[in-house]
Image: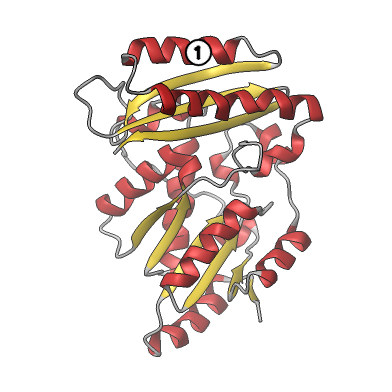
Amino acid sequence: MLKTFTTKKSLQQYLQQIKALNQTVGFVATLGALHHGHLSLIELAQQQNDVIVCSIFVNPSQFNDPKDLEKYPRTIEADIKLLEQVKCDILFYPEVNEMYDDNEHWHLNIGETEHLLEGEFRPGHYQGVTQIVNKLFNIVTPDTAYFGQKDYQQFLIISKMVTMLNMPVKLVMCPIKRETDGLAMSSRNIHLTPDDRQHALILSKTLNWLKTNFNSHNIPTLKKEAELLINAEPGVELDYFAIADGDTLHPADEATKSIVALVAAQVGKTRLIDNVVLSS
């Protein structure tokens, strides 16, 4: 039976009882508009913990564009049905004024990773992410928290925050879930027109091509070819395509051990991201 809490205090009181019984808590933080990618995080959490908390909160501080915040899909009734289907234990669904005071200030010096790739296109985004995840970790105090690989850079930044603030939580990065045609699952996919959706497939196709050909070309050639493939697709405007060090997001070279390819593009009116781990 899904229990729903809307205040920090009521959730914390309930979780104290759980922890008094020495039960482990797994946590999945979301912005709602749930899909099977989110549910796969909950299912993995269930295998590894006694009790699962999922939060749904469209966090205003991580949207640098007010229009994007306004447009972000809010589907709470459908979300609750999905959480009930997968037998999630707890939903935390707070209002903005429950999570933020009027004059809050937050800045965490997470270093240059904040300003690379996504950070360059969405300034301030990762300050908003760390601000809310810090709050949620302090409220839920989970043993383990689960995040999707699709937001690869976000995972690096949250890992850095956890280390910096010495937070007693283990982080798990879960594989990207894809539609049958290869498109990475995303809450934003509902904004794609049928044409956009077809064009959007170039992102996963290019990443697949890259994985297949990774050992047969050098990195500059691979990057150039990948950019050509994406730029040739109508209706798709590339923000960046990077073949990067999986730990620092600096451009990878032949000596780099852990390598990830990351892409962001505007498809019609919708911005999509995707990635693939090439070597680890």
Secondary structure found at label 1: helix
Nearest to the observer: residue 41 or residue 116: 41
Please state the horizontal and vertical placement of residue 243, each as a whole percent of the image: 37, 23
Please state the horizontal and vertical placement of residue 124, each as a whole percent of the image: 48, 33
Residue at horizontal 52 percent and vertical 29 percent from the top: 122
The residue where tag 1 is placed is 227
Dot 1: few (<14), some (14–19), or many (≥20) neighbours within 10 Å? some
Q: Quadrant of the C terminus?
A: top left
Nearest to the observer: residue 140 or residue 170: 170
Report whether 151 appears left or right of 144.
right
Q: Is residue 24 above or below residue 270?
A: below
Of all residues shown, which one is farthest toward the left? 255
Q: Quadrant of the N terminus?
A: bottom right
Which residue type carries mark 1?
Glu
Of all residues shown, which one is farthest toward the bottom? 21
The answer to whether residue 100 shows anywhere in this view is: no
Q: Is residue 108 above or below residue 209?
A: below
Please state the horizontal and vertical placement of residue 173, each as a whole percent of the image: 41, 51
